Image (cartoon, coloured by chain):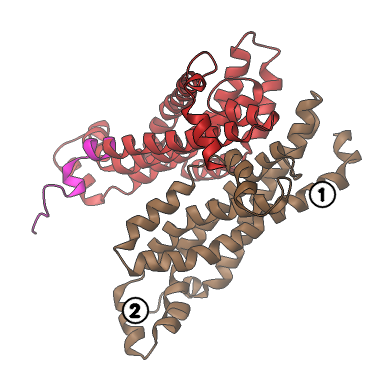
Chain colours: A brown, B red
Amino acid sequence: MTWLRGHFVDVLSLAGQHIYLAGVPLVLGLLIALPLGWLACRYKVLYPFLIIGTGLLYTIPSLALFIMLPLLLPTKILDPNNVVVAMTIYTVALLVRTVADGLGAVPDAVNQSATAMGYKRLRRFMSVELPLAVPVISAGLRVAAVSNVSIVSVATLIGVSQLGSLFTDGFSRAFLDPIIVGVVACVLLALLFDVTILLVTRLATPWQRAGSPAA
Amino acid sequence: MINRIITWLADVTHWRGDDGILRRLLEHMEYSVAALVIAALIAIPLGLYIGHTGRGRFVAVSAVGAARAIPSLGLLYLAFFWLAPRLSGEIALLAPAGIVLVVLAIPPILSGAYAGVEGVEPAARDAAVGMGMRGTEVMRHVELPCALPLILSGIRSAMLQVIATATIAAVLGLGGLGRFLIDGLASQDFPQTASGAILVAVLALAVDMVFALVQRSVVSPGLTGRYGKVSL
């Protein structure tokens, strides 16, 4: 592990890049998936189209998407933003279904009570439906986070540097240390994302720990 | 741009021969199906066992999460350096790629299997026990058929991921549709790269559709409600 000691700063900066490339799409993807998921849940006719349509996006191999995006976007092939867009697409592909199912699982009686209490549609969505759907959405977000961290490393094949760069570096020099460090760092990063999402979920769902009222 | 891709795909010489599309398609399916079968043979019995007994659930959930976090490309190179000196010939390349795809396919199948068995209604299980079924009979006649929809959807999402990821086998010099991506990227032949990407996506879709049909036909009508709703 002398290699790691000598290159610790490099690995850290690659990890920083990795966090950016995997994390920003997670937020953007969630912001896009929320309205789409709401539409799929609210209008049952749209549900299959939105779910199958976004599901299709996930079948595009990551390497293929990384290569093709610069041709559809006004970006250069080496621009890291291609990766951000690609990862956002994957995040949306995973989350639309989760959001729709999470909102759909909110009990009707709760929605009706909120309406009866005078909540208008937007306010009801923000303060009743969305909070109640948080546990389901968070579960989907955890899957998306872990898979983002893993997929981003493939971007090294198109020359965007992040932890995956350690893989190609090690492979081209037939040197194992960077590859092992890269794999371990990716797994740790995935864990970091996971713990972060769990913490935010915990903060966002105080009612889950409120304990059941005496019957 | 689109025209150049269509021209590339329409060129008959790109379809034939040892490095033609048909051959690559076949290789791609070979890698994917082999990995999926191996993964299913490991993950389904394990998942059924965990779901049935409830034992090792925590270990399974953590392992599944950790396995999902392993970057495929890194694992591919690691497996290559580990196995290449120990094996010879094409197997030295096939084995690392196989390991990566199997590791990728196990988590969704495993979690589908144990979640499926866990989700079986306790009343159905109790009824089976009440009818005199033993553990393995309950498993075969009640739990397995009831868990089938989730097991199959686990296999389905594993299949999608495996087909998409089998492209990286080409990084080691193996065949499969990834060749068009890697070779096209190396020679800056964009139409070839894009065609390769389209072929993989189309293959994934086609296989997914076949799976949807299989799912429809093997799942008990009693579960899908295709007999019509039973009035209680």
Residue in the foreground of this view, choosing between B169 and B153: B169
Q: Tell me the kind of residue under disc 1.
A: Leu
On the image, the x and y values in percent for residue B52 come to 34, 40
Quarter of the figure that contains the N terminus of chain A:
top right
Mark 1: which secondary structure?
helix
Tell which circle, 2 or 1, labels the residue nearer the N-terminal end. Answer: 1
Q: Is residue B33 above or below residue A130?
A: above
Task: Please give the range of residues in magenta.
Answer: B214-231
Callout 2 touching callout 1 (CB < 8 Å):
no
Q: Which residue is depicted at the point 63% across and 14% down?
A: B92
Q: Which mark is residue A12?
A: 1
Q: Is residue B217 magenta?
A: yes
How busy is the neighbourhood of tag 1: few (under 14 within 10 Å), some, or many (20 plus)? Answer: some
Left or right: A86 in relation to A98: right
Residue in the foreground of this view, choosing between A55 and B201: B201
Q: Is residue B192 at least partly visible in the picture? A: yes
Q: Which residue is depicted at the point 48% across and 67% down?
A: A34
Q: Which mark is residue A111?
A: 2
Residue in the foreground of this view, choosing between B10 and A86: B10
Q: Which mark is residue B165?
A: none
On the image, the x and y values in percent for residue B156 come to 39, 38
On the image, the x and y values in percent for residue B54 come to 40, 43
Q: Which residue is depicted at the point 67% across and 32% down?
A: B185
Q: Which residue is depicted at the point 40% across and 63% down?
A: A100
Left or right: B171 in relation to B134: right
Quadrant of the image occupied by residue A103: bottom left
Quarter of the figure that contains the C terminus of chain A:
bottom left
Q: Tell me the kind of residue under disc 2.
A: Asn
Q: Provide the chain ID for the residue under circle 2.
A: A
Instruction: Give the farthest residue toward the right.
Output: A6
Mark 2: which secondary structure?
helix
Q: Quote the CA–CA distance across marks 2 and 1.
A: 47 Å
